[in-house]
Image (tube, coloured by chain):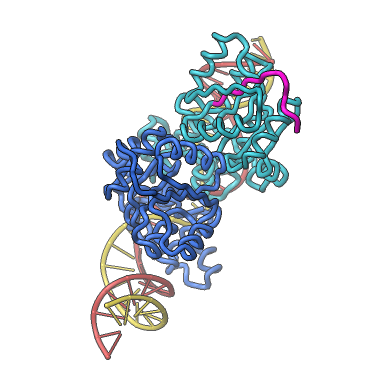
Chain colours: A blue, B cyan, C red, D yellow
Amino acid sequence: MSADKKKITIAIVDDHPIVLEGLQKVLMQAYDYVSTICFSTGGEFLNYIKKSGGGSDIVLIDITLPDINGIDLCREVKTLSAATCVLAFSNHNERSTIMKMLQNGASGYLLKNSSADEVVACINEALDGQIALSREAREIMAKPSARDLQVLPALTKREKEILKLVADGKTSAAIAAQLHVSPLTVETHRRNLMQKFNVKSMTAAVKVAMENGILG
Amino acid sequence: MSADKKKITIAIVDDHPIVLEGLQKVLMQAYDYVSTICFSTGGEFLNYIKKSGGGSDIVLIDITLPDINGIDLCREVKTLSAATCVLAFSNHNERSTIMKMLQNGASGYLLKNSSADEVVACINEALDGQIALSREAREIMAKPSARDLQVLPALTKREKEILKLVADGKTSAAIAAQLHVSPLTVETHRRNLMQKFNVKSMTAAVKVAMENGILG
DNA sequence: GTAAAAATACCGGAATACCAGTAGATCAAA
DNA sequence: TTTGATCTACTGGTATTCCGGTATTTTTAC
């Protein structure tokens, strides 16, 4: 892989100083003409884009950040500066997370356990206009589990509210009293919830909801 | 802080090559007389201890490793080589995880978002024979939440089995048939489960169990 | 302004879960 | 070997959920 002749700018947004150090070291070794610029929060990077007018060629974004999640940050970056290639650099190995990043305009996804070579290879692919996934990310995308394909039911506000109260062990009567509605209404919501989750009892509905982070 | 005159050996066990690079860079800058040695699995490090007879002065261990968890690895390291100071270097910010590491003989706990200075300071403290916690780890230890203090009920094999089936939406009759016992027995287990979790319905029990990773 | 979605509400009845208390059988550890 | 924990099982009764179908009102969105 020949080094790029024109100077490229790589930004890194990660709140782990040690990771910042490691990436900088790896990138300096791999590229002759590169400048790296580090940020520990999403806000700092967005400010930089606005002030510098254009931003970096590449940005590596951690999913977990102190002020904003990497998925939303990715969308904002692409809105402000469409030319910037966003690569996720994260520990999250859920298929749904990778999907969300790509949906929001990311050019690729790197698991944090990627080797230095892999990181550099992915950056090159991204610069080349391709979608760059690290080895493990590719594997995750290749074999979706049954759970990945299961479409989560869209719950209404009221349904979520009632689901939470049911999960707290409250009876329909107690919930009705608390929400100032008829117990019969609560019963209807329960039934709709079970239908949406495609389960036979609220116990199972709570389990599925917990698995998918809808509750708690 | 004056640099140590005698040569110290720092081992790092982490399956993230970038973190390895970063730590190496930081340690090289901070210490004149230091040699670092990296491992990406717990097994590799244990082999190294056995072969080298004694191991390193300090070892930084990630909690999440491919072959063994950092807590068990810590215990094994201390058994093989009591003189080695173990420092956890992890993303896990649960109070219970920090407690478990300390219980198993760790000399300290560093969150991965620690600064380079903090890492060096903690290593020095550990070398000095003290317990070294990073700023955030100290904060976590200082204010335990209600959930941290809540003692999880110890469930028997059978209880776990029945809890899982209940969470799948099965009725007592169905569970009884599956396990070849009386439905009345299943009812008794249900009641004991609710009592242990201190909740009023199995729905709530499932929620608490899911929150604490008892259920898949 | 109108159609779709959501929230509300009802009936009757069957199924199931929850409650309180008790107790024999089994098995592992002290 | 005896004690404690676990698993098993029962009686009898009450409370609650779940099922089916239906329908009005309020919000939301195009």
Is residue B9 inside the magenta stretch? yes
Which region shows up in magenta? B1-12
- Is residue B205 placed above or below A186 in the rendered structure? above
Left or right of A23? Residue B72 is right
Residue at 55% from the left image edge and 30% from the top image edge: B24
In the foreground, C22 or B186: B186
In the foreground, A82 or A36: A36
Looking at the image, the residue that sits furthest to the front is: A5
In the foreground, B42 or A78: A78
Q: Position of residue A135 (x, y in %)?
A: 33, 35
Q: Quadrant of residue B104?
A: top right
Q: Quadrant of residue B87?
A: top right
Q: Position of residue A52 (x, y in %)?
A: 47, 62
Where is the C terminus of chain B found, in terms of image quarters? Answer: top left
Is residue B71 inside the magenta stretch? no
Report how many numbered discs are placed on residues in the image: 0
Residue A204 visible at all = no
Left or right of B125? Residue B183 is left
Where is the N terminus of chain B found, in terms of image quarters? Answer: top right
Residue A172 visible at all = yes
Residue at 37% from the left image edge and 60% from the top image edge: A78
